[in-house]
Amino acid sequence: MDRLTAVPADVPYLVITGLDAGPDYAAWLQQTIPYSVHEVWQPSTHDPHLIDPARFVARIEAFAR
């Protein structure tokens, strides 16, 4: 797991989910990748990028700036 989460601090890391994975996930993510950003989008769905692709693309573009 350490190799999979070894993201350099200068690399933006955005997690967008449509379902809340719970406080354990949020805490784990912050502990593992402290500079990560986690967003839970509504409506609750497994595929937020398919529900609103324009919003998804806009968010990725804004985050990458």
Image (cartoon, rainbow, N blue to C red):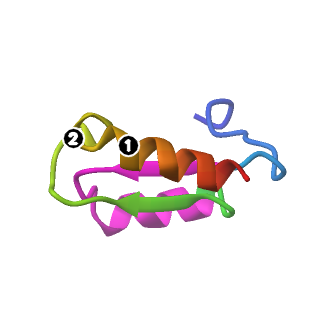
Q: Quadrant of residue 5?
A: top right
Q: From what the image shows, is residue 31 above or below residue 52?
A: below
Q: Which mark is residue 8?
A: none
Query: Along the horizontal axis of the image, is 44 left or right of 41?
Result: left
Q: From what the image shows, is residue 35 above or below residue 15?
A: below
Question: Callout 2: helix, strand or loop?
Answer: helix
Check if residue 22 falls in the magenta segment.
yes
Q: Nearer the viewer, mark 1 or mark 2?
A: 1
Identify the residue at horizontal 77%, vertical 45% (top origin): 11
Q: Position of residue 33 (x, y in %)?
A: 64, 55
Along the line of sight, the residue nearer the viewer: 28 or 49: 49
- Quadrant location of the N terminus in the rendered image: top right
Question: Callout 1: helix, strand or loop?
Answer: helix
Q: Which mark is residue 51?
A: 2
Identify the residue at horizontal 47%, vertical 67% (top origin): 27
Q: Residues within 10 Å of mark 1 (few under 14, many from 20)?
A: few
The reply to whether discs 1 and 2 touch (Cβ–Cβ < 8 Å) is: no
Q: Position of residue 9 (x, y in %)?
A: 81, 52
Query: Along the horizontal axis of the image, is 10 left or right of 61?
Result: right
Identify the residue at horizontal 34%, vertical 38% (top origin): 53
Find the residue positioned furthest to the left.
44
Along the line of sight, the residue nearer the viewer: 49 or 38: 49
Check if residue 26 falls in the magenta segment.
yes
Specify the amino acid type for callout 2: Ile
Q: Which residues are magenta?
A: 13-31
Identify the residue at horizontal 25%, vertical 50% (top origin): 18
Query: Along the horizontal axis of the image, is 34 left or right of 23?
Result: right
Specify the amino acid type for callout 1: Ala
Mark 1, residue position:
54
Q: From what the image shows, is residue 8 above or below residue 9?
A: above
Along the line of sight, the residue nearer the viewer: 57 or 18: 57
Along the line of sight, the residue nearer the viewer: 40 or 61: 61
